[in-house]
Image: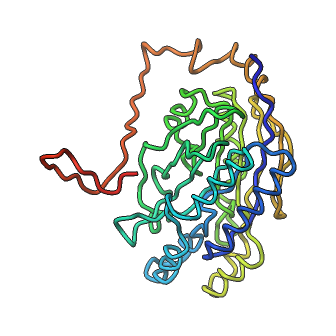
């Protein structure tokens, strides 16, 4: 049976900072535009609704309380009206959509997760994942996630999985998706690629290169296609950040843009690439191209030793409390 040829669109957009209504409008507009051009899978970046907390990289925590409050107020619930409307649109257009967003908790007004939903062509959430470990300064904004959302969805456009930013460095998380038959790997990233203060010293970490390597490793090891989806720093975002913190204007003005692009099962770039302008990038993935490379190195098939290596994944959802009762166990904050 022949595998599908899937048209993928990655929306290299800037969110409307701290405005979930306006940002969701950009989401719906992007989906409609991409679908009108034949896209089957449409991807939005990390924490796209409604901001990535860039300020955490340069401001002391004590100076960020007002921004955290705004971030909470512009975040959404996974079962809220925004995701409900998104599910309906996916079903109407018969497209698969991945959306990164700041997720609110039903039991804590001050708890956020860095999350995504992967909604299939039937309008059903196939994967709802919360980033396992917030990276570096992100710990000031987001709580730890869990393994409950490490799912690969089996859509008519292929088997699709995703990881958030630095999770793509985690070989065990990546293998968890490969072991579920992943054919398209989505990696979602923040808007700024290199965040260093101006200095004569060479940069210690080039995120554009690193991100291509991390997603490329999944493509080469798993013989799958890859998507790198970064958001864009537009003039309004830059104005928001500098107006809030003029003393760090130089820092913000020296951030470089992230990249949005696509990779083949050999790790080579295919399709469009966007970095310095807002827009939608497209690529066509012929999933039949996965078959031949699997003959060389199939890490979830003949090129592994499952009698030697075993991976255990806890897919239960973290919850704050369990109540035992005569009628069973009640669990708080369970989907």
Q: Position of residue 242 (x, y in %)?
A: 67, 83
* Front residue of 122 and 274: 122
Q: Give the colour scheme of this rendering.
A: rainbow
Vertical arrangement, residue 36 with respect to residue 82, above or below: above
Q: Position of residue 243 (x, y in %)?
A: 66, 87
Residue at 53% x, 55% y is 115
Q: Position of residue 308 (x, y in %)?
A: 43, 15
Q: Is residue 62 left or right of residue 54?
A: left
Residue at 45% x, 81% y is 65
Q: Is residue 257 left or right of residue 299?
A: right
Q: Quadrant of the N terminus?
A: top right
Toward which corner of the image does residue 178 lie, by quadrant? top right
Toward which corner of the image does residue 41 lie, by quadrant? top right
Vertical arrangement, residue 6 with respect to residue 131, above or below: above
Residue at 62% x, 31% y is 182
Q: How many marks?
A: 0
Vertical arrangement, residue 211 with respect to residue 252, above or below: above
Q: Position of residue 38 (x, y in %)?
A: 85, 45
Vertical arrangement, residue 279 with respect to residue 75, above or below: above
Q: Is residue 220 left or right of residue 172?
A: right
* Front residue of 94 and 21: 94
Residue at 55% x, 42% y is 126
């Amino acid at each position: 049976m022949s595998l599908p040829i899937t048209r993928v669109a990655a929306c290299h957009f800037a969110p409307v900072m701290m405005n979930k209504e306006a940002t969701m409008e950009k989401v719906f507009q992007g989906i409609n535009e991409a679908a009108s051009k034949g896209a089957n899978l449409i991807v939005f970046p990390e924490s796209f609704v409604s901001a990535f907390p860039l300020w955490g990289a340069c401001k002391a925590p004590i100076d960020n309380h007002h921004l955290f409050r705004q971030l909470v107020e512009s975040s959404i619930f996974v079962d809220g009206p925004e995701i409900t409307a998104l599910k309906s649109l996916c079903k109407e257009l018969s497209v698969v959509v991945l959306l990164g967003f700041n997720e609110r908790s039903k039991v804590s007004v001050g708890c956020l997760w860095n999350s995504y939903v992967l909604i299939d062509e039937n309008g059903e959430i196939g994967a709802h994942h919360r980033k396992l470990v917030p990276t570096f300064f992100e710990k000031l904004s987001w709580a730890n996630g869990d393994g409950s959302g490490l799912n690969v969805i089996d859509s008519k456009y292929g088997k699709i999985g995703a990881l958030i930013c630095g999770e793509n460095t985690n070989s065990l998380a990546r293998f968890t998706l490969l072991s579920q038959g992943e054919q398209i790997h989505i990696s979602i990233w923040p808007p700024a690629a290199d965040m260093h203060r101006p200095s004569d010293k060479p940069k210690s970490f080039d995120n554009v290169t690193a991100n291509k390597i991390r997603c490329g490793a999944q493509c080469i090891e798993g013989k799958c296609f890859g998507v790198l989806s970064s958001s864009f720093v537009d003039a309004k975002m830059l104005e928001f950040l500098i107006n809030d913190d003029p003393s760090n204007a130089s820092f913000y003005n020296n951030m470089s843009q992230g990249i949005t692009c696509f990779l083949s099962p050999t790790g080579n770039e295919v399709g469009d690439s966007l970095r310095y302008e807002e827009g939608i990038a497209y690529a066509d993935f012929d999933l039949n191209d996965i078959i031949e490379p699997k003959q060389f190195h199939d890490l979830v098939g003949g090129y592994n030793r499952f009698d030697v290596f075993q991976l255990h994944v806890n897919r239960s959802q973290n919850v704050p409390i369990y109540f035992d009762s005569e009628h069973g166990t009640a669990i708080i904050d369970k989907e």
